[in-house]
Amino acid sequence: MSLLEVMLVLVLVAAMTLMAAMATRGGTEGMRLRSAGKTLAAELRHARVRAITTGEPQQFQLDVRSRRWHGVGGRHGELPASVAVRYTGAREVQMQQGTGVVRFFEDGASTGGRIDLLTGEAVWRIDIGWITGEVRSGPVRTEAP
């Protein structure tokens, strides 16, 4: 067997492994959903840590309609077009209809909230605790009928 043949076999095995992983994990849409959920959760955690370390309140803003977010320190981004967004949070801090705001305070607490990211039948949920400011994130398990 030549080196070229060995490399070809390795490339084929890697491609088959990737295809199998995508098939069992919801494909590319599932990967986009997980990636978006993990990114938002990380940005929320960053805002909380920044509030604690600077001693100044910080805020994370999410425009539900355009799927754009603005974090602390000028960080911002956009969710994939295939991902729908639902936001539930404290009405007192919402700047306008269709915009979700989570404010983190210097003691780590927050205004709390819940962000659901949806694609197809899959849901990724991000919960922000209002007392502790803890950010929890993960897929929502739906029961089969």
Image: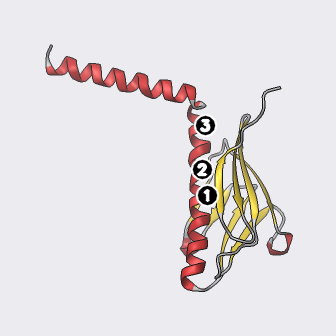
Q: In this figure, which residue is indicated by the disc labeled 2?
A: 36
Which residue is pictured at 78% across the width and 27% down the height?
A: 144
Which residue is pictured at 56% across the width and 76% down the height?
A: 50
Q: Give the number of the disc on residue 40.
A: 1
Q: Residues within 10 Å of mark 1 (few under 14, many from 20)?
A: many
Q: Amino acid at mark 3?
A: Gly
In the rendered view, would you say 34 is above or below 111?
Answer: above
Nearest to the observer: residue 93 or residue 145? 145
In the rendered view, would you say 113 is above or below 106?
Answer: above
State the separation of the CA atoms marked 1 and 3.
15 Å
Q: Amino acid at mark 2?
A: Ala
Say how many tags the image has. 3
Which residue is pictured at 61% across the width and 55% down the height?
A: 78
Labels 2 and 3 touching (C-beta < 8 A): no
Q: Residue furthest left?
A: 2
SS type, badge 3:
helix
Relative horizontal placement of residue 119, taking residue 46 as reference (left or right)? right
- Name the quarter where the N terminus is drawn: top left
Q: In this figure, which residue is indicated by the disc labeled 3?
A: 30
Q: Earlier in the sequence, mark 1 or mark 3?
A: 3
Quadrant in the picture for residue 135:
bottom right
Q: Residue furthest front?
A: 132
Q: Amino acid at mark 1?
A: Leu
State the separation of the CA atoms marked 1 and 2.
6 Å
Q: Residue furthest bottom?
A: 55
SS type, badge 1:
helix
Q: Give the number of the disc on residue 85.
A: none
SS type, badge 2:
helix
Relative horizontal placement of residue 94, taking residue 24 as reference (left or right)? right
Relative horizontal placement of residue 95, taking residue 6 as reference (left or right)? right
Labels 1 and 3 touching (C-beta < 8 A): no
Labels 1 and 2 touching (C-beta < 8 A): yes
